[in-house]
Amino acid sequence: MLVLSRQRDETIMIGDEIEITVVDIRGDKVRLGIAAPTRIAVHRKEVYAAISDENARAARAGGSSLTGSDLAALAQTVRPGPHRNEVSKRAAGLANPAPVAGPAERRETA
């Protein structure tokens, strides 16, 4: 495991596409802002574990022959909600990000 020290407003890059910024430090809690392409699922570890467990239960209930690695791959394809870009912009310190349109608001205008 790589261990890095960062102060508030400092960033760590993972590859060319993922930025992790220390947004705030309060006592023993650190708030991180993560900017990543939407094709990459980002979850807290306990949420990831819950998704994996639910996928495994669904696979067993459906008589599927998926393996653990298949389920891990499926968990990576879970798409975040439409709020993700707004959260990423806020975490990156951009003031007043534009609201993300919901499905009904994504209609093309002439």
Image: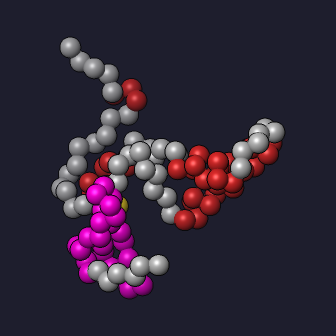
| x 58%, y 65%: residue | 46
Magenta stretch contains residue 29:
yes
Q: Where is residue 109 in the image (x, y as percent from the top left)?
A: 23, 18
Residue toward you, 20 or 82: 20
| x 28%, y 57%: residue | 16
Left or right of 60 in this view: 40 = left
Secondary structure of the magenta portion, mostly? strand
Q: In this view, does 4 lie above or below 46?
A: below
Q: Where is residue 69 in the image (x, y as percent from the top left)?
A: 64, 53
Magenta stretch contains residue 61:
no
| x 22%, y 49%: residue | 97
Tell me, yes or no, if residue 84 can be seen here. Answer: yes
Q: Position of residue 67 (x, y in %)?
A: 71, 50
Residue toward you, 89 or 56: 56
Q: Position of residue 60 (x, y in %)?
A: 79, 45
Report the quarter where the C terminus lies: top left
Q: In the image, which residues are magenta? A: 7-32
| x 41%, y 45%: residue | 39
Tell me, yes or no, if residue 23 can be seen here. Answer: no
Left or right of 43 in this view: 69 = right
Left or right of 105 in this view: 109 = left
